[in-house]
Amino acid sequence: MTTTPPLPSPPADDAIRFALNGRLIDLAGRDALRPLSTLLRDRLGLTGTKVVCAEGDCGACTVLLGRPIDGTSQREERFDYRPVDSCIVFAFQCHGAHVVTVEGLHPTATGCTRQTRDKTNKPGTEERHDEVAGPCHNALTVIQNALVHGHGSQCGFCTPGIVMALHALRERGRDLSESSVRHALSGNLCRCTGYQQIFDACEALKDVQDIATLDDTYDEPALLQALTKNQGQGITLTAEVPCSLTLEGEGRSEGESHRGQERNGQSHKDQSRNGKTHDGASAERWMHASSLPTRTVTLRLPGTLDEALAVKREHPEALVVAGATDAGVWHNHGAPWPDHVLCVTALPGLSACDNNGDTLALGGGATWDTISDFLAPHFPALAEILDRFGSPQIRQLGTIAGNLANGSPIADSLPFLFVMDAAVEARSSSRGSRRIPVTSFYTGYKQNVLEPDELIAAVHVPKPADHERLHLEKTSKRRDMDISTFTAAIRLTLDQTGNTIETAAVAMGGVGPVVVRLPNTEAALKGQPFSEDTMRIAGQTARHEIAPISDVRGSAPYRFQLAENVFRKAFHQWNETPVMT
Amino acid sequence: MPSVGRSIPHESAAGHVTGTAPYIDDLPRYAGELVVGFVGAPFAAGRLTRIDTTRAKKLPGITEVLTAADLPPAAAPRFGPIFHDEPFLPTDEVAYLGQPLVVIAAENSDALALAKQAVTIEGDPTDPTLTIDQAIERDRYLGPIRHIRRGDAEVALKQAPHTLKGEFFCNGQEQFYLESQATLAIPEDDGNVRLISSTQNPTESQVVVAEVLGLPYHKVVCECPRMGGGFGGKETQGAIPAAMVAWIALRTGRPTRIVYDKTLDMCITGKRHATKAWYRAGYDDDGTLLALDVTFVSNGGAYADLSTSVMERTMLHADNAYFVPDIAITGKIARTNLPPNTAFRGFGGPQGIVVIESILQDIAQKTQRDAFDVRRRNVYGHDARNVTPYGQRVQNHVLPELFDAMETRCDYRARKSAVEKFNAESRTHLKGLAMTSVKFGISFTTKFLNQGNALVNVYTDGSVQVSTGGTEMGQGLNTKVKQLVADEFGIAPRFVRMMTTSTEKNHNTSPTAASAGTDLNGQAALHACTQIKARMAEFAAAQFADESRGLTPSPEHVRFADGVVFDERAPDRRLPFGDFCDAARRARVDLGARGFYATPGVDFNRETGQGTPFFYFTTGVAAAEVTIDRFTGDLVVDRCDVLMDVGQMINPGVDLGQLYGGFIQGVGWCTAEELCYGDEGQLLSKSPTTYKVPNATDTPRIFHVNTFPNPKHTINVRWSKAVGEPPLMLGIAPFLACRHALSFVNPDRLPPLNLPATNEALLMAMVAMRGSSGVDCAKNTKTSRREVPSK
């Protein structure tokens, strides 16, 4: 691992390169496979980034990940900085990007309002009461300074992550009003403050114009030049990683994911991932050895989609990593690396969203943040759901293909895609593209019909027709940054009068091993008057079409009740029955 | 200008926002440092038959693989803060799932992970006791049964015009400090060891480590620079990991560190006690409480830890802010196969307070009176109805005034009407509005803990170092003590530095707990300052004496203010404090002192349940308005108003932070934070993915937090009041607002709602109260009230 100032030598084709706080970093071998937070803290000594949950569910490790914006389509060449949870970003996903940590918020250029401290160092010579303790008093950004003086930190452990999430807001040109800050911090947990003094500190900055951004701090064109050289070329990298043990006579399951399967998707993954045994060294064999048993992992970062498909044909068992919001969690819970890893993070040509007349095409690699912006005008109900999808950090990484491939029965996007009769476009290098109706995509719990050499290239969603009503439900224990207990989508078309239901589509998640359409319920709605009574009957019908279980997120009776009630809730929302006074 | 009363920033704030304030895992690695982990029990109850570590020991990169059999002969078999009943590493009987059995030290984390897999543990698991009900059935208890009684509750209940009988369950709560348990052990020469630990209780860590390793106490030093949150979870729970690394460091002579990951921490450390209460209350037509008989049983977990003290505080808060003429309070602790439950902000108080607040809410529903009026009617008075069940007079308080002020400030009557109108009209949502109060007793109920000591060093440039036994976990203790000391010497706070808490500077200390950190350590620091200032004043008096102006040496006229020292009779002659200190040292004046403080007048006899356990009470009221989705149970806390008497604030910014933060933590306990266990005793809600602490978007949109003056409060350090725990118990207000909302579903039925009021619990309670339409109604009710949800 080396760090150099941005005086680029060409990057090697067996190493990744990214910039960290303005300096270039080339990584090969195992360091490239480490979570970014581990690399920062344990390998680079940048301990300002804290780790709490290592699951992407607290935001303490938030850093800014700046991807180059293509100068041809945008007004200027620069980085687009987004907040990410560095505990579930693998270092290799940062290839070509600029990572900025709390240490990199260069204060001299980011608009420090604090002047140099008093020259007096003895009591009695001059008095000053507006003081800040600790080092670097004059080295705070405007946002940091506001938090210091507004009592925005108590124990301080979540604070660097909160500072980064607030700077992310600023980087995207958003204001620091309370509503904006609430939303921006919905991926950061603070256990001490109750958040109010953070809001108040930021509110005081709402009209401050001179909060500098990172393009003032860093020579971005120079960094871009160093990072984008040889862009489009693939990288193949090998790493030695430790084995886990197979104890003789004990069928110990290796690195079993504690939670990964329940997460709301977002990372690519292939079916073989559920099988274990990529490694397994006998304990007896490794006793008295001079070093730990290792095995070789091959990581491919293709430069193009075609190259990615070729890798997938060659190594159909490869773990496909897009956002890694699941794979990162599995890794931190001890899941072993498979022999082959295919990284499609930010792969050119995979993330575009297009309006194709009657349908909307969502690139498989499009992140939820992108999709939310793209679909919001067509599906306001979906925008509300996506606003609560994961967290701001997760939405910058997670992709629609990952959500589909992971196939969690409580994936937030699936009920919507099911009632819209969306199609999954699978592509292979030998057979090209095929479209699979999403309703026949799954064959069982986390099982799907993808062929081993296929990648999800896109998802095609028909545009809504006139007279359509769409209701989407996401029930979770906590409003934000929570995995759903129950999800539902109800799509009705009404006749000209608006009094009769012509067609109905209903899908639910969290009520069985896969997301399901409810044909009997749909039949109970079709042709019926558009009334609360119809909805009540539909709800009672739905109860008999689902088979939920009790788990940590909720009991089966609760899920039955939600399934029954969601129809009447939808009816009242469509009719805009007064909700709040 | 004095700094007390001003909102100077937290002393570490700049370090927090820049990430430069180090926590245990941030401290640089030593060369040759070892990483430590352990293998825990694979079942929650039963006997161990075999622990095989031979394979693990022989793996590369493994330095030590130790079990109880490796402990030195002088090691104490059991430890504990009250009862010595907990083994460091059990030898035969396992008491909870994941209980540490095998300690492993490795060169790196890869080797450690591998070695953990190579350990074999076998045993005969038995059916674990997990719930309070199971423990009662099996007659498993910890510690003695305690009583607090006044009058004759039985007779009064018989004579009361109305009685209410019920039971109430409140779930536990995970502290969820962000920095998990962590300790770095550095071996020193001659068999000594230094611990740098994330602990609220360095003395306890020192003592437990010494005892379980068979050392005299003076061979162990424990330091705590800061914690990434504590909330009570680091009062005792840091001792086991500290003992592990101390042991390895002493055996290997190498620095050794352990840092729990979040899931491990949540799975094996103690939490707030789940508590069940059975009660009978007697009241009259107006809702005046006449009698109360209540029995609390808490889920203590596998060992006593602090459970008896926690239960004591539950019982001492069964009255909360309300006078009950005839009362009988009983407390028991269930012994179960969960990790030993422990301190958590409020320390049993919340479990007591929520019961009487619920009873009053139900009495209001039963008598068809306004719940505010019922509470106001029962609140402690000034001249009468002012003695607690344990015989302590509630004095110099402003409880009735707080109620009346809140009624106006939050526009209670108009909003109550609006809520009623809304509920009559809305098909989709229900609203509720409730006001609750807190009267929290300040002091450790164990008398001897009410002491503190401090060390103050004044240097010859006039700068000052202060060390106390108090630990900084974000609550701002150090900032407040710094302000107190700065004002004593009349210097700016930046010339006062708070030093790392260490048992070698401040020994035999109490945990930083019971909200009393500033009370005890601040007073001790002031005592040290007083001694130094007396010596300084004597020296200064001689300097300022001027016979030509008729000034005789007079220490009592010496003043320390604005960075200078002067004689108030001749204030024109001023010595800069730094120069003065230099001169004093040259005149051989001692510029350092150790201060000590013991809270006066507190005493409590737990055998009789009578006494004066508290120095004073911190009090407050809160009003909360909630909206519940009738179809999904989704809860939104719309507005909260908090009003508290916290005395004269030493640092309003810091203290308001405690009010906001404590309140929201209480709201979390009451709403979304739900601990779930599986049948084997495994925690299912074991990370923030499944355990939901309040998010930024959960903070009420309208959130007014204010303080209320109390001119009658003229005790305690600078007339301040403890502020850490009390606001948490006002977070109960939204829970009562939920019960108020549910009362509109069916006014004839009391809401079957326990705590927490999750969306699920609310929906199922609505179904149960409607009774007719819901399918599986009875089943649903049962589920929503489950104590331990099954997988």
Image: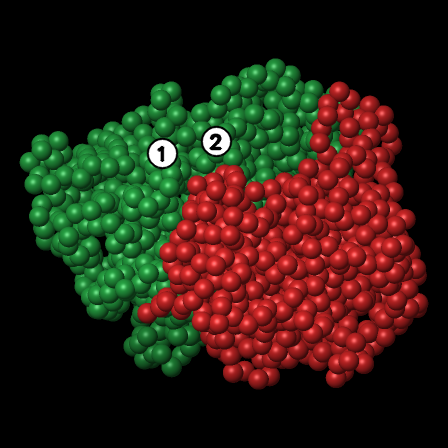
Tag 2, which secondary structure?
loop
Which residue does the image show at 64% across and 27% down from the upper left?
B102
Q: Amino acid at mark 2?
A: Leu
Near mark 1 (Cα within 10 A), the count class, few <14, some 14-19 or many ≥20, is many
In the picture, the quarter occupied by the N terminus of chain B is bottom left
Give the residue at x 74% y 62%. Answer: A458
- The residue at 45%/29% (across/down) is B130
* Same-chain status of marks 1 and 2: yes
Mark seen at residue B338: 2
How many numbered circles does the render carry? 2
Q: Amino acid at mark 1?
A: Ser
Looking at the image, residue B470 sits to the left or right of residue B551; the answer is right
**Chain assigned green:** B
Label 1, label 2: how far apart the Cα atoms are: 12 Å
- The percent coordinates of residue B152 (x first, y second) are 11, 33
State the residue in front, B445 or A548. A548
